[in-house]
Image (cartoon, grey):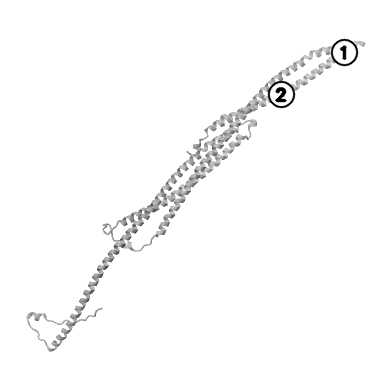
Amino acid sequence: MNSEIILSRPYYDTRAAAQGVQEKISPLESNNLQLSSDLATVGYQIILEQAGTNCHKSQNIQQESRTLCKETTADAFKTQAEGTRLLGERLQEIHYWKSELQRHIENLQANTDSLLILKRRLERALDATEVPYAIVTDNLTCRARRLGADLVRDTVEDELLKEVDLIKSIQALLKKTAAQVVAQIKRNRSAQQTLEMDWSDKCQAYNFDDTSGRHSNKSPDTQNHQSSATMQEQVSNPSSWTKFTQDNLSQALQEEQATNSLRMLVEQMLQDTTEDLSVQCSNVDRAFSLHCDELIEAKTQLEVKLTQILEQIGGQERNIEALQQAIHNKEAPLRVVQSRLYLRSLRPAMELCRDQAQLSLEGEVRLIDATLESLKKKLSEARGSLSHLEESRMALQKDINCKINLLFIDREKCMTHRKRYPSISALSGY
């Protein structure tokens, strides 16, 4: 800092000067004037030096200002250009992730739509199993009305019970699978919602950065925002920002893969259940057909045997009549020989002789008695045989009626009802 000398200003009477009166100067004042003159000379020199210094200093400041202006202008343009470039790179990065989000959003939506279709197929397939279940339960109810010895657990019964168990297990599997599909749809929609929120945020950020990148020094819509330049707490950094979207996309990819696996599982499951039901239906139909053939053959054999039994009954009845007639025919000869022997027993004294005639008559009686005994025994046997034949006839007729009833149940009731079995496409949920 330059030292400054403060000088007292000499008194000057302006009124006297104006009136043209010259002041009288005393000797003391004359000495003071001489001293003031010297001081004035020194002050003048100092002022000149100070003015020169200030002038030089001003020139330096001007030169430095011009240099500073050029440098700051260049730095400002460089910094602005760098900011514009970085904004452009950021826009490309946001656009890339926004495109990835959009792609996976569309994939999730497509997967959800496919699962909704599968869900409807599962529901239709489940509804379709009600018809086979009604058919098989009706078959079992009808066959419970079988008669006599035919009310047994045969091959058809076993196949029908297998069909009941199969339908119940398939219905449980369809319900469980439908619940899995619904759960996957919820997870897909949750992941899609997360991606859509991320995508929406990136759209806004993209618009802001795009608008920011279009700003220039000549833009009329720029304004001063003093507080915007201050450091603010950020919710993320570049690494966490990227990781956030990558995690969202990774979760979405997992759901997409889970959806694909579930879709293939459901398709295979529907195919397997349809095939299982079709195979079991064929097994039941084949068992019914074979059983009906067996019933027809058994009924035919029973009818043939019944015809034979009826013929035997007729023959035995005629045989009994013949035996009865033969016994009746022996009554007259027996009366004759008995009358002869009675009359001969009335012969007197020595005339009561066992002569050849007597012996012949006695032999005739014995022969007729033996013949009657034999005929009566054979008549009893014939009557017993006829009774057994009648029992066989009744048993055959009853069994034939049972077979006719069972044929009606299996062929007319059950097999006819089974023609309403759903088609393969209906069981597959189409």
Q: Is residue 362 left or right of residue 253?
A: right
Q: Amino acid at mark 2?
A: Ser
Above or below for 186 versus 70: above
Is 189 left or right of 337, judged from the image as shown? left
Name the element at disc 2. Answer: helix
Q: Residue lying furthest right in this view?
A: 350
Q: Quadrant of residue 335?
A: top right
Tell me which amino acid carries mark 1.
Answer: Gln
Residue found at the very far bottom of the displayed protein: 27
Q: Label 2 neighbourhood size at 10 Å, few (<14), some (14-19), many (20+)?
A: some
At 61% from the left and 35% from the top, the residue drawn is 155
Looking at the image, is 329 positioned above or below residue 281? above
Q: Looking at the picture, tell me which residue is in the foreground, 189 or 84.
A: 84
Q: Which mark is residue 358?
A: 1
Q: Which residue is mark 2?
A: 387
In the image, residue 52 above or below residue 74:
below
**Among the two numbered marks 1 and 2 on one chain, the one whose residue lies closer to the N terminus:** 1
Element at label 1: helix
Q: State the separation of the CA atoms marked 1 and 2.
A: 43 Å
Residue 51 image offset from top left, x and y in percent: 20, 76
Name the residue rendered at 79%, 18% in the picture: 372
